[in-house]
Structures are given as C-alpha cells and as structure tokens.
Image (cartoon, helix red, strand yellow):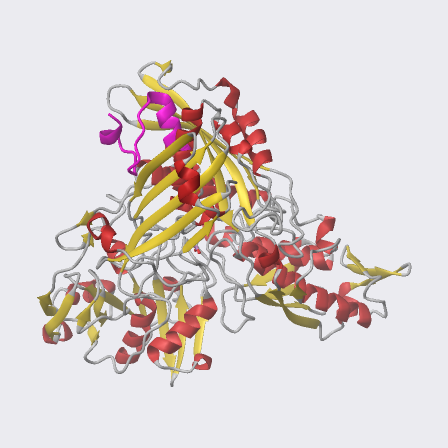
Amino acid sequence: MKFDQPATLNPIDRGRVIGIAHDRIDGPAKVTGTAPYAYERHDVAPNAAYGWIVGSAIAKGSISAIDTRAAEAAPGVFAVVTHENAGPLGKGEMNTAHLLGGPRIEHFDQALALVVAGTLEQARDAARLVRIDYAREEGQFELAAEKDKAVKPPVSWGTQPDSAAGDFDAGFASAAVKIDRTYTTPDHSHAMMEPHASTAAWLGGRLTLWTSNQMIAWAVKELALTLKMKPEDIHVMSPYIGGGFGSKLFLRADAVLAALGARAAGRPVKVAIARPQIPNNTTHRPATIQRIRIGADKNGVIDAIGHEVWSGDLPGGGIESAAMQTRLLYGGKNRMTAHRLAVLDLPEGNAMRAPGEAVGLLALEVAMDELAEKCGVDPVELRIRNDVQYDPEVGPKRPFSSRKLIECLRQGADRFGWSKRNPKPGQVRDGHWLVGMGVAAAFRNNIASKSGARVSVDGKGQVTVETDMTDIGTGSYTIIAQTAAEMLGVAMEAVTVRLGDSKYPVSAGSGGQWGGNSSTAGVYAACMVLRGILAQKAGFNAEDAEFEDGMIKAAGKAIPLKQAAGRDGASAEDKIEFGDLSKRYAQATFGAHFCEVGVDMHTGETRVRRMGGAFAAGRILNPKAARSQVIGAMAMGVGAALMEELTVDTRFGYFVNHDMAEYQVPVHADIPEQDVLFVDELDDKSSPMKAKGVGELGICGAGAAVANAIYNACGVRIRDYPLTLDKVI
Ligand code: MOS
C-alpha cells in the first residue's frame, strides 16, 4: 500500500481496541522469566559454549604480537578467535570501527579476541592468559581541544550539516535583545538493562543467530557483509530485547564473535558483552559543544536564530545532529545551523535515544529561558509567541502536518500549576531547600519508514501477525495486536503476534521513534488486503463489509470470520510505503515539560520534586504503553541534566566510569511524581494510523526543564552538563 495522500476515515478510526490502554501482551512471559532472551536459548542451543571478549587495552595503534597458546591450553577452552585465524572478514556499513580489531586498533576495548570455553568462568579465566603486545600511538581524545580542527561533514542519514535562511548575521547584529551562549554536553551511555548478547549456531554453511537487536534486516545485511556470506544463509531472531535506546540499532561484536566462535569451536556459542565492556566496546552518544545565538525584539519575538554544534567521532564516523530541532521549532526570518565534526580516537559514537534533539534541546531550551528572562516575558508565553505553523526555513508552503505545541504548553502549564511560579529566582524556600520551577518545549522529528507484515486467519478464527518488527520494551507486540484486532474485528485474545525473525516480512524496525507508527501501518496494509480476501470468500463486496465481533457483516448478513477463512485459513502480506507527504509537510512531535526542583542551600544538591508534561504525537495507539515510554524518557532526560556523564581519560582515551556503579542513571525514587497528558491529535499525513512516534519525544527537552528549574530555584545558571552539585554550589 502506497501512502501518498492524507488518510481518510478508515477502520482504525473506530477506536474499539486502538487508542485504549491495554497491558503488554508480552508482560506475563517477561515477568515469569519465560520470554526467551538471546543469551538464554537453552531450548534451541542446549550445548552452547561460552565466549568471552578480550578488548584492546590501548585506544589507538596496533597489535605487535598476540600469543594465545596459554589460553588455548587452559581448562575447558575450545577455541580462541583472533584476527589471525578468523579468516577473511569484511566490514559492515553501519559500524565505524571493525567489530573484530587487529592488527590495527581503532579504539579502547575494541574486541581483539574471543575465548570460547565450556563454561563462562573458564572462558573468562582463559581470556586473562591471552597475551597481546601493543604498539601504541598518540590519539586525540578531547573534543574541546579538537574543536577548531572540526570540519563540515558530508550528508549523513539524509541530514545536511548546515542550513540557512534570510541573513542571520545581519539579523543578529541589529536585534534589540541578544543571547549568545555556549553549552556543553558529555558523552552518554545507553545503559540499557540487557547487554548486547548473541547465541550463534551453524548448520553447514548456514548461520542461525539469536541476538538482541533493534533492526533485524540491517543485522542480516551487516552480518553478510562482515562474514562475507549470502544474506539468505543467515537467519536472525530477536523476539525479546531488554532495552536498546539505539545501542542495538547496529550489529556489534557479540553477534560477529558468537558466529566466528561457533565456527571455530564447532558448536553453538553465546557471547554477551560484559557490562564493564559496554561503554568502550560499543557505541555511545557523543559529547557536544553548542553555541546558540538568538536575536529578538523587546517582546521576545525572534528575528535571528543560530545554532552551531561541534562533536567528534572516529575517522569515518558521524555527527551528533544537535541543531536539527532549531531548524523547525521556532519562527524568525534570519536563521543558520551548522554541525562540525572533529576526529576523536574515543570509542565509536552513534545514535542514542533521540539522537540530535535530546542534547540539542538541553542547549536551545535553556537559551530560550535566558531570552525569556532578558525580555521579562514568561517562558511559556515566550514559546507561544515564537510558535510557527510551517517550516520556518522554507516558509508557509511547507506547513507542519500537525503541530500542537501551543496546546501542550497551555494545557501542561495549567495542570502543573505554572501560574504559581515566582519568576524571580531564589525566592521560594522549603526548609533548607530552594524551590524552583522550569519549563521547556519538547520536539522530536517524526520519521515514517517502509514496513511489511503478514496477517493470517486460521480455520478457528485465530489471527496471526508476522513481521520482523522488534519490541525493545516499548510495546510493539501489544500495539500490533491491537491494530490487527481492530482491523479484523476480533478480540485481543484472538491475536498472536510473532516478531523479530528475519523469516518474516521486513519491517521498519525499532529506531528513531519510527517503529510504532510505521510497523502498525504495515500491519494495517496487510489487514486491508486480508479483509478483501475474506470478504470475497464470504461473497461480500469488500467495500461494504464490516468486520466486528468475529464476524464479517454486509447486506444484512453476518458470516463468522473462521467460516470465511475456511478450513485452510486465509493469509495476506503487504507493506506500507510512504510517498512524498513528509517532503510536502514538515512532520514532528511536540510537547512541553514542566519540572519543580529543590536545591539544597548548603550542598547545592538538586532533587526533582515533580515533573509534568503534555505531548502531541498524533493518535496515541495505547495510552498506557505510550505513557510508559514518555515517563521513562523523561527520567532519561533527568539523567542527562543531573548525573549522566561518561568521563574521558584524556591521556589514554577511554571512558573511565564504565559500569553501572559509576555511570549514574536516575531511579524511580529520584522522580517522586510524574504526570503525563496526551493532547488530542490525529495526524492524517503520518500514516493510515494517524499516529506519530512517541518513544523518544519524552527525553527531548526534559533535562532543560530541570536546568531551568534549578535556575529559578537558586539563580545559578550552569551551561555545562551534567548539573552536579559541585557546579551549582
Ligand atoms: Mo534510536 S537512538 O534510533 O534506537
């Protein structure tokens, strides 16, 4: 099904199952420990051996000698895989560094060997016996020091590094009120619960891989490139995933080394990247330096807005696109954005939840708070004054498909009690706490991506959906079941959803908050074809047929679905393909975050007291799952504001705090109260579902609301994240 015209009234609009809060259908399997995760496939690979990764102890250079003899002779060891014996390997297109390094070493903890043994302890023990001699080279590890050497990067992921409209320099120079500030954000780690993990098994020349990966089709393609195999000889399964946040968008060392280890050991092998290896071996969100300049009139109406971003990555890597929201969020006729990329020899940077906006808004939305104060305008009102209903770089000929930022700001402010805020910092006290409130806008791009599915009804009226879509803890199983139940007029209990298998039709996968809307639209497309088949079998006109209560109804007659399907059942496969609507209309999701903090007068410690947010993201397919996404993302925003930071050892080029003890993330107790409101919205240009993404919106701007609340509480403005007590005091 080609989606190139705005959606009209369709079966989803009935809203009997879609749009209703529904518990996760995969929940019971997860909480009873029966959901098969990649490292636990005892059922299908009962005799699997264990692999342990040996990572590089230097950041840059080469291996001068590697001696595996002692490891190979250790108890229980089946094989030691290194670049010397792994056979010819290619390289995927999506990872910057090689997943098995050597002799060149591109970053600290890059995998250089895999030890395979009968038990995990034997593998880990023998890994210590692998002797590697290094020829170490000097590297560049500090973004601030490399900033001036940063260059304009090529277009990546369809993103132009620069944009401009009007004359920024002239507009800024002549503005009545000016803000010119620089903000910095550190490297972040995804810190998802389940580590990267894979179990691999070979049957002849064919590879079966149970793994934890957000994008099944990408994984197959990248494995084929890396292992120099035909994609049709690779079977990837990832039915359950314990979190991803972008860390599992791309193939990582666990998958490649499990495959190589299994080949070398002649038996299935499982590999998990150990928690202390994750931050340096895998990807992270790159640090940024961001300069924001805003020129406005005395009433805070923006005339000129500029956002420059510097970030770094390994040679051949990409940018942290932190200026993207600044192209679309506020009006103003004179505009510029620019991204500059420095070469750093740190571990590989890449996407982490809301890449770009998550840290871009930590800068932009604080700059807006600074502008509000300078103009003496309420920060909610300032944002409303600068709302724009079209792409401000292009003009009114490219309107937003839907944009309810003003509604989010107004409704969110009401619910939060914003009117009680004292605009003057440092005025409100509660014992030894200085109390303040902050607001920030939320903005996240909305991407729609081709997505396929197969839907079947069997002779008993049971519906099965198959698609290679993944569920990274977001609720994909549930919203896909809801979509099929709505489309075919059956109860949720009559629907089985099978995900995360490369044998199923290729879906959009889970990333960039495109998965929910795109994958359900793909299921919608397949259901439309199936409805036609079933109606015809029932002897009805497809257009007249109603699907409800397990029946197909038309012309005063009703035939049970199972009867129409017949003993052999009926099945249909289709995919949604998106035309140029997203070029004709700017598409994004919006929201407003509100936060109240207390700052300890004596220690500078910040405690979030409560948060509230209002969000507009098209049709909310399942309000319970969507709320869970948003509150989790808001918590991640609090982490970025207050505690999350990978600390770089600038001498040796690695992240020092590479475990969950020292990489701090918020827990439930850190945010005692969270309120989420979804503003009514249907987006007929996003898909037949009229939904948009919501999985990443909640992190966007949340941290800036915390920062602005700290300023309101105590009058201290810090522009260097995280806003730890040593900086506040
Ligand atoms: Mo997301 S960072 O595209 O999983």
> In the image, 379: left or right of 264?
right
Note whether 139 is above or below 677 in the view shown. below
Q: Is residue 191 visible?
A: yes
Position of residue 203 measured from the top left corner of the image (x, y, whole percent):
39, 82
Position of residue 102 measured from the top left corner of the image (x, y, whole percent):
19, 72
The image quadrant in which ligand 1 is located: bottom left
Position of residue 194 measured from the top left corner of the image (x, y, whole percent):
36, 55
Q: Is residue 656 visible?
A: no
Magenta segment: 704-729
Position of residue 152 measured from the top left corner of the image (x, y, whole percent):
33, 58
Q: Nearer the viewer, residue 502 or 88?
A: 88
Q: Residue 53 falls in which quadrant of the image?
A: bottom left
Note whether 149 is above or below 417 in the view shown. below
Count of numbered badges drawn on the protein: 0
> In the image, 175: left or right of 103?
right
Q: Is residue 722 magenta?
A: yes
Q: Quadrant of the C terminus?
A: top left
Name of the residue lying farthest toward the bottom? 204
Q: Give the residue drawn at x 50%, y 26%.
A: 299
